[in-house]
Amino acid sequence: MIIIGERINGAFHDIARAIRDRDPGPVQKWARKQEAAGAAYLDLNVGTAVTDRVGAMQWLVGVAQEASKLPLCLDSTDYDAIEAGLEVCKEPAMINSVPAVQEKMDRVFTMAQKFKAEIIGLAMNEEGIPGDAESRLALAMELVANCDDKGISPDRLYLDPIVLPCNVGQAHAPEVFETLRQVKLLSDPPPKTTLGLSNISQGTKNRQLINRTFAVMAMASGLDSAIADVCDGELLEAIATARVLLNMDIYCDSFIDVFKGIG
Ligand code: THG
């Protein structure tokens, strides 16, 4: 499972303050901490309070790269900010994200081609997030087709079925699992899959239990990657166990330690 560390996001107060004051400390602390915990990418999101998203994203990319060699996942709906970030990325990055809206797909897939970036495609369009798997898959198909049109291999696209908090959108979770299963049939090679894991528990009690239960269920449906709290040790243990039970890793008595790189 490819984990994209979620923590460098202006939704968290320490990161919002760091961006406002241009204080690299908290950003670099979380970059190092998430890398040590096993993240494969670092998500960078400037948050909603920022007015200069272009400047903020470029600053975040610069300071994150000083602390970690991990590839970056530039998370914004502002494509000028993403492009400015890509220009200062030392390694190929991931663009997070593009919905199935034609002019946005045109811009993002062209940008991805230019910067050799991977792309997260959202199963939504200008009408919002569909309620059922079938409509999510129709949007996923548009994303795959547009990716292909631009000469980008579909396995560089991470399909995100979009997860809503289970306390307000409980009916969505089974549709997300069904989308994850069927999206693999859309092309050869198939697109990869990802989701914002912590979305599922926003505003709920017992968040970590909901997150890790959702993670293993999604893995059983074919989830390849997640934007997640990589510093949650019990989440990593659940993921390691699911990998063994799905026969993705060979069982050994210390499999959890091995997964964490300490055994
Ligand atoms: N899909 C894609 N990208 C995404 C998401 C997605 N990026 C953003 C988000 N969703 C994933 N990242 C987070 C980061 C933080 C939280 C949830 C998802 C979170 N934040 C606390 C909260 O809202 O309660 C913030 C406050 C705090 O704890 O201080 O839960 O779905 N492609």
Image (cartoon, rainbow, N blue to C red):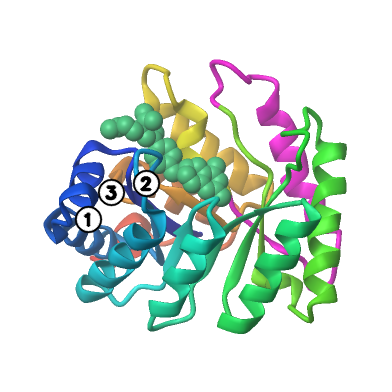
The CA span between labels 1 and 3 is: 10 Å
Q: Quadrant of residue 202?
A: top left
Q: Quadrant of the C terminus?
A: bottom left
Identify the element where label 3 is drawn: loop
Residue at mark 3: 231
**For the residue marked with disc 1, what is the amino acid?**
Trp
* Closer-to-camera residue (204/57): 57
Q: Visible in this render: residue 184? A: no
In x, y percent, where is residue 112? 62, 74
95 sits to left or right of 139: left
- Residue positioned 73% across, 64% down in the render: 191
Residue at mark 1: 30
Residue at mark 2: 51
The CA span between labels 3 and 2 is: 30 Å
Q: Are marks 1 and 3 in contact (CB under 8 Å)?
A: no
Q: Quadrant of ligand 1?
A: top left
**For the residue marked with disc 2, what is the amino acid?**
Thr
